[in-house]
Amino acid sequence: MAQPRIGVFVCHCGRNIAGTVDVEHVTERAAEIPGVVLATHYDYMCSDPGQDLVARSIKEHRLNGVVVAACSPGMHEDTFREAARSAGLNPYLVEMANIREQCSWVHQGPAATDKASRILATVVEKVKGNLPLEPSTMDHANKCLVIGGGVAGIQAALDVANAGFEVLLVERSPSIGGRMAQLSETFPTLDCSQCILTPKMVEVDRHPNIRILANSELEEVTGFLGNWRVRIRKRATYVDPEKCNLCGDCVGACPVRVPSAFDEGLSERAAIHIPFPQAIPSSYTLDKETCLGLTPLRCSECRDACEAGAIDYDMQDEFLEEDIGAIIVATGYELLPKERMAEYGYGEIPDVIDGLEFERMVSASGPTQGELRRPSDGRVPKEIVFIQCSGSRDPELYKPYCSKICCMYTAKHALLYRHTVPDGKAYVFYIDVRAGGKDYEEFVQRAMEEDRILYLRGKVAKVFQQGDKVMVWGVDTLTDRRVEVAADLVVLAQAMVPSAGVAELARKLRVSVDEHAFLKEAHPKLRPLEALAAGVFLAGAAQGPKDIPESVAQGSGAAVKAVMLLSAPELIHSPEVAEVDELLCSACGICSPQCPYEAITVEDTAEVNEMLCEGCGTCVAACPSGAMSLRNLADSQVLAMLRAALEEREEAEVSGG
Amino acid sequence: MAENGFEPRIAALLCRWCAYAGADLAGTSRLSYPPNMIPIRVPCSGRVEPSWVIEALNAGADAVLIGGCHPGDCHYVSGNYKARRRVALLRRVLGELGVDPARVRLEWVSASEGAKFARVMRDYVEEIRALGPHEGGLGSSTAPEAVAESVVEAVEQVVQHG
Ligand SMILES: Cc1cc2nc3c(=O)[nH]c(=O)nc-3n(C[C@H](O)[C@H](O)[C@H](O)COP(=O)(O)OP(=O)(O)OC[C@H]3O[C@@H](n4cnc5c(N)ncnc54)[C@H](O)[C@@H]3O)c2cc1C
Ligand code: FES
């Protein structure tokens, strides 16, 4: 600041301040501070005449800094900055001294007056060091990238597209739909999962603003907020979707049979396949990994069978590059892998299965058309045991967290079981029943009472095969009795874990994951839809265990966040951010790992990306050479503020509050 | 009123999102506390440089309070963890220099904890009152200025990796 010409405006706030603090005295003391050319006080500074007084004084006294001593900056900082702007003064040269919330309302007597004038003095020192600033602005791309085509990604894509923006929906597997496409009926209403999902999938397919890239994954991301350049690999499917008429002749011709991932291994598929009839995009995919051999070609049965001539063995992976303005990550979840649950015999005993396998078994579109038959011998199970929290809430061995949806889907499973096998017996082992959700508790109660499912509170100690039965030993802690069930089928409610490969994806996107590899939000309460990297948003179970309504809600929420970004004429960012003095910087690199937003890169010197920096100043405090500084809160400013706060004063005897 | 007539002077560096907002709430709720503290608003407790604390003690403060968000709640995710580490180191250095580490305190106060803010202030003022005034010039009577400078430097050295 050239020669400081600071105006100080002390507010009475009616009696709120003036009833306690001697405002005249505070004004007089302020006038004595070097650099203060005007000090005055007024009844209500925030009133129109108060604001006019500020604006007029700026012009009359050619002020180059303003301090309003009044309420907390949260209340009226914007008001006075606007008033200053209208009078031609840069708003960043205006600050508030909080002499109400942090002084007149909590102290009394001369001590309150002394404290008020000290607070005021600190802020005058700050303003002396402030620089006029302009918000940074930047153009941005208009397209949204959605990664993951589960129900969360589908909802996000539709909402962004309906707001008028182009969407690129990248799905790793051959079809969008995610886990929801695998489910039978959905709690708490028991409507058929595919019946409510497939219309949305079709809508995505038909939407003029959405381009689906199935069998595709993100290869590389460069750039940042609003201006990413992404490279996507679209794996060759060896089938031209334009020509494929879905006749299915190729499947009959293919000599290969491997377990179907969509059916959780309960059925077999050919190397050339469509995961389920309503898959979108509706086309077959030849899976190179299980095909007998493409290079050199070992078999050509499918091509020979295809009358449409849709099969092309020379098809190559494609690479697409796109400019992207906003990114939504909705990569979903999977269940804790079987190999890991040895104590429940999971992965060893054929009749111990997980929840998704059960979904496929009772699904009308499943391998048994919804008839429940156990894997080992195809018999209908007459006694069935459900074990909740398998791998969840188990910090010693597995996951410490609650997977949140298992209480609900276990109740659903037990109820569906009782509806399909009316003379069957269902037992549920549980730790607690957590049914927090609209109509959820009612649903569980109904399962317990109307469908006479036996809920046993306690942990299962052992599961083992005995003859053709699966023995389950446990303790009912409510009655303190040992329980032994000779079951025909055991269903484990496996912990939900993030989709494989998420950590790598997060690295590419430069976003963080938590200790369980769920995507981490910018703030657990206030910014649950945003990743730490600006412009990247989160939706669905990729961020933590979630049911469908929550995933959909988050999908819509993330879409709004993305649309806010895409629809802005240009990106605007606060200029009160960190800044490097290149002459002082030794490129030691201490700053950059301090930054939670990846805003600092270090090459010849450190460099701060102003659009990413949020202005916390943590890097500044860490810089050993004083090269890093926070605009308008430099070290020198804080030190001057401290000196002003602590200045020796003859009259300064603080007396009781 | 203190019997010994000593009124501690405390500088408080409060993060704007939590501790400063908590102090505002104490005001809105009219929860009075001793006026011995002068607040300075900073974006985050992670912005606080340990050398400021030394400088404040040299400039006449009897103690420095740093207020931040509760662990896990920092508006900037992890600034408060950095602050916690830096303050822990700083307290060790102060101890080495013969300054009671109690003269710097880090407190987590959320925006909804007006009552906690007032209580912390009451406690801290009492504690420092009992401790007595901080006699300036850290650790040396011969060349307080020079020593203070080297102390600041030493602290920066120790703390920058925090
Ligand atoms: C047994 C069981 C029963 C359930 N029953 C119900 C119920 O009745 N009611 C209910 O509300 N909820 C139920 N749920 C929960 C429901 O499945 C989830 O809430 C929902 O599927 C979450 O949707 P999502 O889009 O977040 O994730 P997902 O459905 O997992 O979709 C994620 C998508 O992202 C894709 N993907 C992953 N990684 C990448 C990558 N790197 N690149 C590109 N694409 C990628 C995946 O292929 C997938 O298509 C049940 C869950 C289980 C396990
Ligand atoms: S914002 Fe409060 S401690 Fe970081």
Image: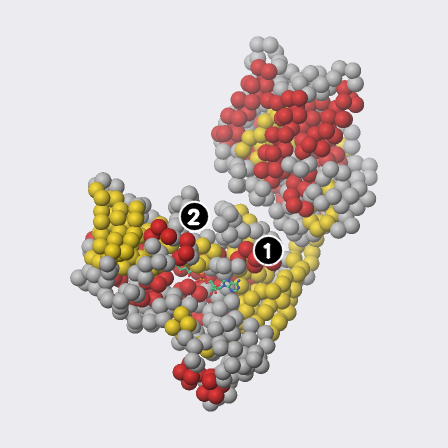
Q: Chain of mark 1?
A: A
Up-down relation of residue A350 to residue A11 (above or below): below
Residue occupied by mark 2: A399
Q: Mark 1, residues whose alpha carbon is within 10 Å: few (<14), some, or many (≥20)?
A: few
Residue type beneath disc 2: Lys
Between A329 and A175, the one lying in front of the other is A175
Measured from the top left, where is residue A354 in percent x and y?
35, 59
Whether residue A191 is visible: no
Residue at label 1? A507
Q: Quadrant of residue A78?
A: top right
Q: Residue at x 38, y 67 (%)?
A: A265
Q: Which of A86 and A164 lies nearest the eye of the viewer?
A: A164
Side of A260 where B98 appears, left or right: right
Residue at 42%, 84% (x, y): give it.
A253
Give SS at disc 1.
helix
In the rendering, at what x and y percent does residue A588 appear? 74, 43
